[in-house]
Amino acid sequence: EAQVTQNPRYLITVTGKKLTVTCSQNMNHEYMSWYRQDPGLGLRQIYYSMNVEVTDKGDVPEGYKVSRKEKRNFPLILESPSPNQTSLYFCASAGKEYYEQYFGPGTRLTVT
Amino acid sequence: AQRVTQPEKLLSVFKGAPVELKCNYSYSGSPELFWYVQYSRQRLQLLLRHISRESIKGFTADLNKGETSFHLKKPFAQEEDSAMYYCALRNDMRFGAGTRLTVKP
């Protein structure tokens, strides 16, 4: 089944403790991206990647890192999480034409 | 800067009533716009795109370049249409803030 998977789905952590949210897609898509969803603000893009070893900042990249060493994986790294990064995070991927983004199930992160 | 604006955060209608979810965009080139929907406990998924000019689940959306709008319409809302709707600009993968539609029985 073609899909985007994210892990973990739920995470509660403390300020400053490094964490990684994994994202994987099995559709051989070139494009992958991370969004955060906050009430009233909608989906805001954090980082995106057009292909392996190619990443770029979205609208809200501060406090986040990404890597794209393999086509299927696009992990989101929070080196030192802070409470303002408490949010619902979505990973998405799209094929070469970028006509449709396929979204993961979301990761709900709480930073205390 | 390119942007997508959805002026209504919340929209509530009764079953059988017409519904229109507004989307305005700002883009210097030739825009390509999508509507995505997120039903409760489900993933965000594509609803429709302006280039295909299709009707999905009774919804249609027309790109109006003069008014820079891409409003989503349905003549008779159903309870199962209750969801979060996002307008998106494919050109830079940006989304609006979303409109939560509630269809009351």
Image: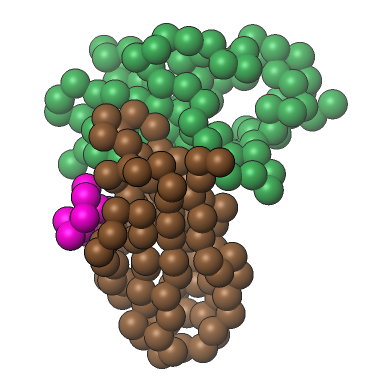
Chain colours: A brown, B green
Residue at figure coordinates x 60%, y 70% from the top left: A10
For the record, the magenta segment spans: A48-57
The magenta stretch spans residue A54: yes
Between residues A98 and B8, which one lies in front from this camera angle? A98
| In this rendering, position of residue A11 left or right of residue B92 | right
The magenta stretch spans residue B38: no
Q: Is residue B49 above or below residue B92?
A: above
Quarter in which the N terminus of chain A is drawn: top right
Between residues A17 and B10, which one lies in front from this camera angle? A17
Q: In which quarter of the image is residue A70?
A: bottom left
**Does residue A39 appear in the picture of this structure?**
no
**Does residue A80 appear in the picture of this structure?**
yes
Q: Quadrant of residue B70?
A: top left
Seen from this angle, which residue lies furthest right?
B105
Quarter in which the C terminus of chain A is drawn: bottom right
| In this rendering, position of residue B80 left or right of residue B92 | right
